[in-house]
Image: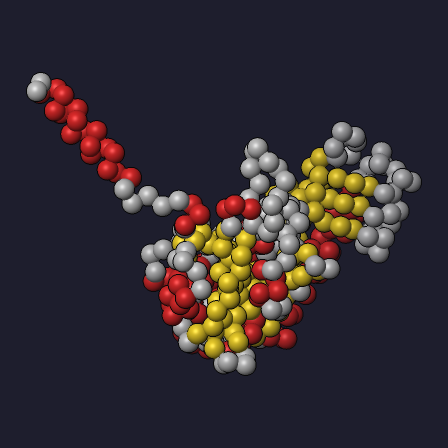
Amino acid sequence: MPRKIIISGLVMLFVLTGCWDIKEIEDVGIITGMGLDVDDEKEKLTMINQYVVPGKIPTQQSNSQQGIPYQNISQSGETFFEIIRNNSLESNRPPNYTHLKSILTSTALFEKERADKVIDLFIRDHEFRRTTPVFLTREPVLEVLNTNPTKELFPSIQIKSLSENFQKNNQNPTNLSIGDMSQLISEEKSFLIPGITLNEGNITSSGAGIIEAESSNYVGWIDVEDMEGVRYMHNTVQGGFIYLDEEAIEEGPIILEIKGSNTKFKTKASGDQLEMTIQIETSTVLAEDWGTGRNVYKKGWKKEIEEAANDVIQGKVERVLKLAQQEYQIDFLNVSKWVHIHEPKYWEDHEKEWNEIFPEVDFKVDVTTKITDFGTQNFNTE
């Protein structure tokens, strides 16, 4: 037999045996979302796995949906690892988490269990990606994951997509991944988990929950109206808008579209006293003006609008500072980061007392808003 034929046969044999252990997609338990909660009656942990049902996903040949394309399997146990292994008692498709899009947790869970313990499995296990975003809800987790999404096929993907809108609306919190949580916990910092709620049966972004550093437990909620102040403090404002109503500006409401924003912190330590100035510079364009009687050709007419915008932003930041310092007395705004950077000696001497010092820090908020463009009606403002 010619040598070439023998070599070709061996190559073909090697290639053909490469698919001996292939699995059909229907036999793989693809998980797109996970819910973590507590079962108060059984006094156990609860995990909900959102399985993909491949046969019910619309195809290019048939756009009509054949039913709900997911199945939620809820189980309870003493540990999350135990629950994952016990999935085999209810399904012949072992859960595969390589396509996990979001993890939804409950405030009830973090009231009972420490956050560092809750995420331990997801940091250790190689199958879970540290980039998976985490969300928090005050609703029963299973109820949220059972909701028919309005924009996506799966509730878990609908939840994840909400965190991608932070550049459009500053009431949306920025993403928080499992990796982010792990780092913040290891640094012994308080932090916020983006919130999810049901609004008339629709999955909606809704503020954020506070995890306190020392206890590693849930301690309170930041309402959606206060998230803008948080975003300015965290220096994560990239877009969004500023709404100036009739109380803020005469001759009707105005919308300014934010094109960029930068927050700087200046810290001054004098003995045991600490002062901090928060400088916010925001660039905007005039997006919508309901003041039809406004004289836009009057010299300096935009200054009144810019000053009104300054007051609105300042009010939002001062509001969230009041929540942090007075209501919760917790530095979930990560102010300590700037003290550590700008006053390293002060931080070294007072780090262990920060929880007592933070409520007494003297803050000053200085805002500068500039209108740089006016859309197609590019008025002369000189």
Between 356 and 82, which is closer to the camera in this rendering?
82
From the viewer's perspective, is 285 left or right of 294? Answer: left
**In terms of image quadrants, where is residue 278?**
bottom right
**In terms of image quadrants, where is residue 95?**
bottom left
Quadrant into which the N terminus falls: top left
Between 205 and 274, which is closer to the camera in this rendering?
205
Q: Find the residue positioned furthest to the right.
A: 293
Give the image location of residue 183, x and y in percent.
41, 62
Asked if 1 appears above or below 203 in the picture, the reply is above
Residue at position x 17%, y 24% from top?
A: 8
Is residue 177 something one can see in this rendering?
A: yes
Residue at position x 67%, y 61% from top?
A: 198
Asked if 14 appears above or below 161 in the picture, the reply is above
Q: How many marks?
A: 0
From the viewer's perspective, is 121 left or right of 19? Answer: right
Asked if 291 appears above or below 38 in the picture, the reply is above
Quadrant into which the C terminus falls: top right
Give the image location of residue 88, x and y in percent.
39, 63
Between 182 and 259, which is closer to the camera in this rendering?
182
Is residue 163 something one can see in this rendering?
A: no
From the viewer's perspective, is 36 left or right of 345? Answer: right
Give the image location of residue 304, x and y in percent.
79, 47
Give the image location of residue 140, x and y in percent.
60, 69
Residue at position x 89%, y 39% from top?
A: 292
**In terms of image quadrants, where is residue 257?**
top right
